[in-house]
Image: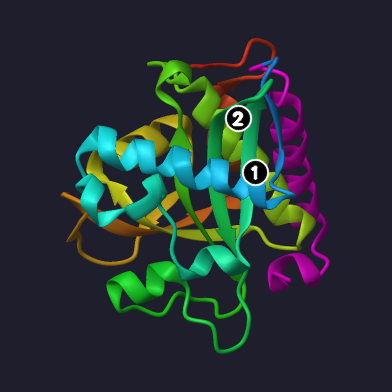
Amino acid sequence: MNQRFAHGDEEHKRILAEVDALASQSLDWVAPIKFSTAQSEAERVAVYRLRYNAVIEHGWLPPADLPGGIERDDYDNIAIHVVGWDGNTLAATSRLILPKPGLILPTEKAFDILVEPRDQVVDASRFVVARPYSSIEHRVLAVLLAKTWLVMREHGYEMACAAFASLAMLRVYRWMGFHVTVLGPARPYWGEDRYPLLYDVAEATPSLIARWDQSQGNMRPAA
C-alpha cells in the first residue's frame, strides 16, 4: 500500500476521494461500454488479440514476430487486465502489474531503471482502444484510464509507472490533466522513441478536475 495514504493524512485522503469520485462518475460517459477486469482465459485471449491488432496497425512489429495473432509476454501471467466491453466486442484494454519484493517491473526492465518509491508503484501499460472506438476527444481512453485507476485503488496503490509512451501520447496525457514525470531518456521500442513515465494522480487532482467536464465527459482545453 502506498505509504502516503497509509500515513492517514486527512487532506491526502480527501484528494484521493475526489479522484475516485471523478473516475467512478466517468464510467457512464461511454455507455454502453462496460468496464471490468478479465476473469477468464477467453477474455484474456481477446485482450492479446486486440493488442496484436494495435501493434500491426501501427507497424510496430511484423505479423511474423507475433505468432498466433496475439501479443503477450511473461508478465501477462501475473497481470490484471482491465477490459471495456461493448456487448461481445472488446473496445479497450490496459494491463496492471502490481509490485512485489524482488519483482522487476516491465518499465524498469525495458529502460534499466529502478522506480521509486519501491514497492509502491504499479506498472500500467498496454493501453489500447480499438480503432472503431477511438476519437479525437479520447473519451474511451479517458474512461479506460479512470477504470485502471479505480482498480489500482482497490489494491491500495495511487502511483503508476508506464513504459513505451510516445512523445505524442505524452502530450495527450498532459492535455488530459495528468501529472507525468519522465523517468529517463527515450529508447527505440516497437518502431518509436518511447519514454519511461511516472504518474502521480493525486498530485494532478486540481488539473484533472479543472480539465474534465464531469457532466458531459468532455475535456476542456488547457488554459
> Which residue range is magenta in the image?
1-30
Magenta-colored stretch includes residue 23: yes
Magenta-colored stretch includes residue 49: no
Residue depth check, mark 2 versus mark 1: number of the one nearer the observer: 1
Q: Secondary structure at mark 2?
A: helix
Dot 1 corresponds to which residue? 43
Q: Secondary structure at mark 1?
A: helix
What label does residue 143 carry, if any?
A: 2
109 displayed left or right of 177? left
User: Which residue shows up at 58% across the image and 67% down it?
Assistant: 77
Is residue 212 something one can see in this rendering? yes
What label does residue 132 carry, if any?
A: none
Measured along the vertical axis of the image, is residue 10 above or below residue 55? below
- Identified by mark 2, the residue type is Val
Residue 203 at x, y = what percent?
A: 57, 51
User: Which residue shows up at 57% across the image and 26% down it?
Assistant: 210
81 displayed left or right of 73? right
User: Which residue shows up at 58% across the image and 57% down it?
Assistant: 96
